[in-house]
Amino acid sequence: MAGSSSSLPPLCEKISYKNYFLRAVDLTILGLLISLLLHRILLMKQSDNVWVVAFLCESFFTFIWLLITCIKWSPAEYKPYADRLDERVHDLPSVDMFLTTADPVREPPILVVNTLLSLLAVNYPANKLACYVSDDGCSPLTYFSLKEASKFAKIWVPFCKKYNVRVRAPFRYFLNHPAATESSEFSKDWDMMKREYEKLCRKVEDATGDSHWLDADDDFEAFSNTKPNDHSTIVKVVWENKGGMGDEKEVPHFVYISREKRPNYFHNYKAGAMNVLVRVSGLMTNAPYMLNVDCDMYVNEADVVRQAMCIFLQNSISNSNNCAFVQYPQDFYDSNADELVVLQSYIGRGIAGIQGSTYAGSGCFHTRRVMYGISLDDLEDDGRSLSSVATRSYLAEENLAREFGNSKEMVTSVVNALQRKPNPQHSSLTDSLEAAQEVGHCHYENQTSWGKTIGWLYGSTTEDVHTGLGIHSRGWTSSYISPDPPAFLGAMPPGGPEAMVQQRRWAAGMLEILFNKRSPLIGVFFRKLRFRQSLAYLYILTWGLRSIPELFYCLLPAYCLLHNSALFPKQIVSRVSLFSGKGDSFVLAILAAEAPFSGNINTKIERILASSVLFLPCLRRCLRRFRCPAFGKSKPNLDRNQNQNRLAFVSSSPLSGKSPVIQRR
């Protein structure tokens, strides 16, 4: 419960970055691009078709740069003061943490284990935390590894909190030996912890090649005769915190979930798994806030939960509780991702200064009742309780059953969440297992609003952008935190065919959103999406479409050399607009892609490859959308989830810059 004294310092503050020099640069570039277009128009009658194609491509690039200028105009982010939380808040809210994985080959169990351990060891009362792991591959190896990790967590969590360890993922923490100045007690405990972690790694590695443990333990009976795409719901309480006092030696609740799958049923990729996590956690702990993390993005800052709570609770204290989610940027420990730094620093902060950061798929704290579909207009002026109209609309028993499903336990959980009341405490988490298995059935969502207006939204393979757009369209805002050190760190996946396949899925998913009923082109007129926020979403959703003019523009110089045609104007102003001296036909394409202009040929080649991969899928999607006879609708394939689901769980939006697949052998 938060204190109400206005004399106390705030829990967070919004920092705006108004750089007038960058604004002037952006406007100058925009002016030069427009001058180039005007010059093209004036000489259009004297030129050939190459001139027309160049004009069309440059018009698109100018439009993209206009969007970028609008987005970057007022960048902002939030700075939390986690050290003030204890004096302002006497009873911290509960948080449910979601960890998703799908394939023990592409997402090695030891990687999932390290992410899990970093979540369990965050600097937050253990009795206020619960971790739910969704294994969409229904892998007994993953479950075995998580069980072993829960045993190690009983000594790892107290060790981290006793010595205030900053990096709480063991595989990163044990890379460096303790300093010679450390106490002998710490050195002894450090050596012991490292030995135990090495034992854990050996157990997981041995289990990978030998499955004798599968038959020896009755706990694995549920995994017998199962396939990744054909199995019943499995919900297991791996560890339950029965202490409930928040002591530093306690370990948070830990639950394993594998939702039901059937070969002839479409499972909606990661969004479907996330909605099962919401329902199961609602029945067991029903925390008002939820964190979702990809299996390869471990917690790098122990105070990450406290930082996010500073945002939510400050808004609650000031009666401006309109923040739906808090997004952290995605950073990586194994690469020098300069392009990502530029992308998130400028574009990410720019969007955060409008209506709020977009949802990037991982490292995000959500408000549960917002995910249940309520809009900002459904709340009273205090921003907490439901209005009388919303109460009649949402809490009517027949409406609840129709919207959320026929589970009475689920309906009770939803009512408590919407009214900001805790669930009636069960004597044990296992008391909810039967109801949890029911809401994990693949047919539970039939004739409900799950995936339509409730939870993670369906209808696109980029469920993160789709869900974030739906939240902003209902009037909610979001917050962006970029702490130092980074809150989450992950592995930068290598390139290759699988990364290109995911880029194609990104592009297709973006276009699905652009042309559906939640399009930002519609939301700005008929919903509560702000105009500049709709431009920001338009910039993101047209990511794949850029491949068409980019590829044409890259091919124009070669065509001109073969046909002795003029591509670039000779006048001084137009030369300046093309950054004369570089002689670079890729400048506008790279500029539109907001890659750092360093002259690095690798950046240009990667962009050309991406454009080549995205060109045909985007062109086909557009032609299908406008009902071109040459591209009829493809037949629905209910089994496609079987093959593509491997890529679904580490899917993030292009804004995060994160490739989806980790290939480790």
Image (cartoon, grey):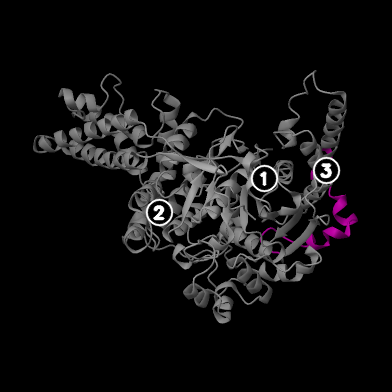
Where on the picture, by quarter, is residue 123?
Answer: top right
Q: Residues within 10 Å of mark 3 (few under 14, many from 20)?
A: some
What residue type is disc 2 on?
Leu
Number of disc labels = 3
Q: Quadrant of residue 149?
A: top right
- Image side of residue 281 versus residue 357, left or right: right
Residue 200 in sight from this viewpoint: yes
Q: Which residue is mark 1?
A: 86
Marks 3/2: CA–CA distance: 45 Å
For marks 1 and 3, the one nearer the N-term is 1
- Give the CA separation, mark 2 to mark 1: 45 Å
The residue where tag 2 is placed is 511
| Numbered tag placed on residue 152 in the rendering | 3
> Which is more foreground, mark 1 or mark 3?
1
The image's mark for residue 435 is none
Mark 2 or mark 1: name the one nearer the start of the chain.
1
* Element type where label 2 sits in the image: helix
Image spot of residue 105 (x, y percent): 69, 45
Dot 1: few (<14), some (14–19), or many (≥20) neighbours within 10 Å?
Answer: few
Q: Position of residue 417 (x, y in %)?
A: 61, 66
* Mark 3 and mark 2 residues within 8 Å of each other at the beta carbon: no
Graded by Cα atoms within 10 Å as few (under 14), some (14 to 19) or many (20 or more), the crowding at tag 2 reads many
